[in-house]
Image (tube, helix red, strand yellow):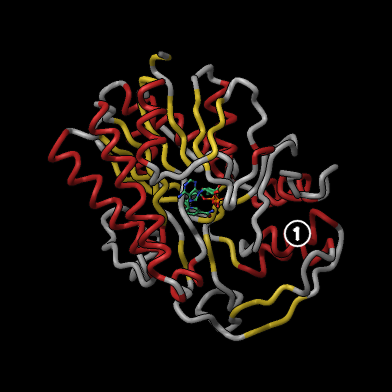
Amino acid sequence: MQEGAILITGGAGYIGSHTVRLLSSQRRKIVVLDNLVYGHRDAIIDDQVEFVKGEVGDKELLKELFSRHAFAAVVHFAAYAYVGESVQNPLKYYRNNTSEPLALLDTMQDFGCKVFVFSSTCATYGVPEVVPINENTVQSPINAYGRSKLMLEWILADCETAWGLRSACLRYFNASGCAEDGRIGEDHDPETHLIPRVLMALTGEAGPVEIFGTDYPTPDGTCIRDYIHVNDLATAHAKALDYLQTGGASLRVNLGTGKGVSVREIISAVEAVTGQSVPVIEGQRRAGDPAQLVADPSLASDILGWRAEHLDILQTVRSAWSWMNGPTKGRYSS
Ligand SMILES: NC(=O)c1ccc[n+]([C@@H]2O[C@H](COP(=O)([O-])OP(=O)(O)OC[C@H]3O[C@@H](n4cnc5c(N)ncnc54)[C@H](O)[C@@H]3O)[C@@H](O)[C@H]2O)c1
């Protein structure tokens, strides 16, 4: 039995794979559990990492894994994350994002594993009245995706009361960018994230970029978001694990840069990095898109000593372009 291993669900996905790479480089023993519905086997590039294809809700499989490894902690990325789909098919989201993890928590309780790092989201805040958003902002999600995540935050708090689980709910803003060496990156199908979507308009993988609304009360009329580099997210997970594993109390923190960037600014950044002109269509607002979502990340800095290092959007876009424009053209083969 391997002592102190860490179970990472969804570790073959976008944010998970970057975090697996960092944690493994820190000589931690990592086991990845992913059903590969959206993830990629090739996104796990370290041979030391054990990969298991399977479901987060598969109790027999979990029992086998927990019997074989004395897991010191679980990092839980596995989820569905398409907001629009969650509105059309809410039960799919409640099943996968809220209900399936119950089997995982049950097994953790049975095996006495009491540290949990959770991929929460700024979508749990809904449409905030005040920006930047701090952790005292009321959580009032406006779609099934946000609610499916908020419910798991509540469940984690209840598990703490009942059996002492300590958790870090990390509320990410817009994950973006790729590994600086271009070896791993973002490969979603369908791709809805703005930076890869804009780059795909240049590579011909997608049509012109539609700007959803140009009449928002923002300086250039387009929506403003907080683009946090995926490697900064990975670093925050490493710090959250260290913090919880050395006895730190449960925490709920925003992970963002604290800096807002508009849709038009992203398009300009892509044009600056690539030297190409982006084809654009100006469309209508989408229902439920807040004008601005920007984090106040100071609590994560106070508690974890974590700060985003990628503050220049050009640097973030450059890393995404090096992956999209690299040898595999931004696609994994498996
Ligand atoms: N990407 C963002 O901007 C963002 C922002 C806030 C929160 N999040 C959250 O971060 C996490 C990771 O996001 P991502 O962008 O890397 O998504 P992703 O789809 O790339 O990764 C999720 C991974 O989980 C796996 N998975 C899903 N359901 C599973 C299940 N039941 N059992 C086993 N594996 C399963 C998928 O195959 C995939 O590899 C998600 O929980 C998401 O909700 C993402």
Name the side, left or right, on which 128 lies relative to 207.
left
Which residue is label 1 attached to?
Answer: 270
Q: Position of residue 325 (x, y in %)?
A: 83, 49
Residue located 56% across and 31% down the image? 51
> Is residue 145 in view from this perspective?
yes
Decide which of 136, 157 is in the foreground and name it: 157
Q: Position of residue 28 (x, y in %)?
A: 49, 19
Residue 126 picture quarter: bottom left
Q: Does 172 sit above or below residue 8?
A: below
Residue located 73% across and 81% down the image? 281
Name the side, left or right, on which 245 lies relative to 228.
left
Image quadrant where one finds the N terminus = top left
Q: Does 170 sit above or below residue 94?
A: above
Q: Position of residue 194 (x, y in %)?
A: 64, 63
Residue located 36% across and 20% down the image? 70
Residue type, label 1: Val
Q: Does 15 sit above or below residue 90?
A: above
Residue located 44% across and 74% down the image? 87
> Is residue 233 in view from this perspective?
no
Element type at mark 1: helix
Image quadrant where one finds the C terminus = top right
Decide which of 152, 232 is in the foreground and name it: 152
Characterize the local packing of mark 1: few (<14), some (14-19) or many (20 or more) Cα atoms within 10 angstroms. many
